[in-house]
Amino acid sequence: MLKGLKGKINKARLLSDLSEIEVTDYWHNNLDDQDCAFLDVRWTELPDEIDTVIELELK
Protein backbone atom coordinates (compact mmCIF):
# COMPACT_ATOMS: atom_id res chain seq x y z
CA MET A 1 0.00 0.00 0.00
CA LEU A 2 1.43 3.38 -1.06
CA LYS A 3 -0.51 6.19 0.58
CA GLY A 4 -0.92 9.37 -1.47
CA LEU A 5 0.06 7.77 -4.79
CA LYS A 6 -3.37 6.75 -6.11
CA GLY A 7 -3.37 7.45 -9.86
CA LYS A 8 0.18 8.80 -9.80
CA ILE A 9 2.17 5.65 -10.70
CA ASN A 10 2.75 4.95 -14.37
CA LYS A 11 4.75 1.74 -13.93
CA ALA A 12 6.24 -0.45 -11.19
CA ARG A 13 8.92 -3.07 -11.71
CA LEU A 14 11.44 -5.13 -9.80
CA LEU A 15 14.84 -3.49 -9.96
CA SER A 16 16.62 -6.87 -10.06
CA ASP A 17 15.22 -8.04 -13.41
CA LEU A 18 12.85 -5.22 -14.52
CA SER A 19 9.79 -7.50 -14.46
CA GLU A 20 6.63 -5.42 -14.22
CA ILE A 21 4.33 -5.41 -11.20
CA GLU A 22 0.63 -4.63 -11.50
CA VAL A 23 -0.43 -1.33 -9.94
CA THR A 24 -4.04 -0.91 -8.83
CA ASP A 25 -6.03 1.80 -7.09
CA TYR A 26 -8.14 -0.64 -5.09
CA TRP A 27 -7.74 -3.64 -2.84
CA HIS A 28 -10.08 -6.32 -1.57
CA ASN A 29 -10.42 -4.83 1.95
CA ASN A 30 -12.22 -1.59 0.98
CA LEU A 31 -9.04 0.47 1.31
CA ASP A 32 -9.61 2.21 -2.02
CA ASP A 33 -10.95 5.38 -0.39
CA GLN A 34 -7.62 6.32 1.23
CA ASP A 35 -5.82 7.85 -1.79
CA CYS A 36 -3.60 4.76 -1.96
CA ALA A 37 -2.01 2.79 -4.76
CA PHE A 38 -1.42 -0.93 -4.34
CA LEU A 39 1.28 -3.16 -5.81
CA ASP A 40 0.03 -6.65 -6.56
CA VAL A 41 3.00 -8.96 -5.96
CA ARG A 42 0.92 -12.08 -5.28
CA TRP A 43 1.91 -13.62 -8.62
CA THR A 44 5.45 -12.27 -8.73
CA GLU A 45 8.41 -14.22 -7.41
CA LEU A 46 10.26 -11.73 -5.24
CA PRO A 47 14.05 -12.06 -5.46
CA ASP A 48 14.47 -11.55 -1.71
CA GLU A 49 11.76 -11.95 0.96
CA ILE A 50 13.28 -9.24 3.16
CA ASP A 51 15.00 -6.75 0.86
CA THR A 52 13.38 -6.39 -2.54
CA VAL A 53 13.65 -3.06 -4.39
CA ILE A 54 10.76 -1.90 -6.56
CA GLU A 55 11.25 0.94 -9.02
CA LEU A 56 8.30 3.30 -9.47
CA GLU A 57 7.83 5.41 -12.58
CA LEU A 58 5.59 8.31 -11.67
CA LYS A 59 3.29 10.14 -14.10
Image (spheres, rainbow, N blue to C red):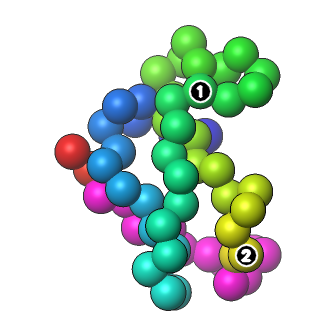
- Residue 32, by quadrant, is top right
First reached walking from the N terminus: tag 2 or tag 1: 1
Q: Is residue 11 left or right of residue 29?
A: left
User: What's under tag 2, amino acid-wise?
Assistant: Glu
- Residue 34, by quadrant, is top right
Prevailing secondary structure of the magenta residues: loop
Mark 1 burial class by Cα count in 10 Å: few <14, some 14-19, many 20+: some
Quadrant occupied by the N terminus: top right
Magenta segment: 47-57
Q: Position of residue 13 (x, y in %)?
A: 46, 68
Q: Which residue is mark 2?
A: 45
Q: Residue at point 78% right, 22% down?
A: 29
User: What's under tag 1, amino acid-wise?
Assistant: Tyr
Q: Is residue 18 above or below residue 54?
A: below
Look at the numbered disc 2 and give the secondary structure of its residue.
loop
Q: Residue at point 47% right, 21% down?
A: 35
Q: Residue at point 64% right, 50% down?
A: 40
Residue 54 is a magenta residue: yes
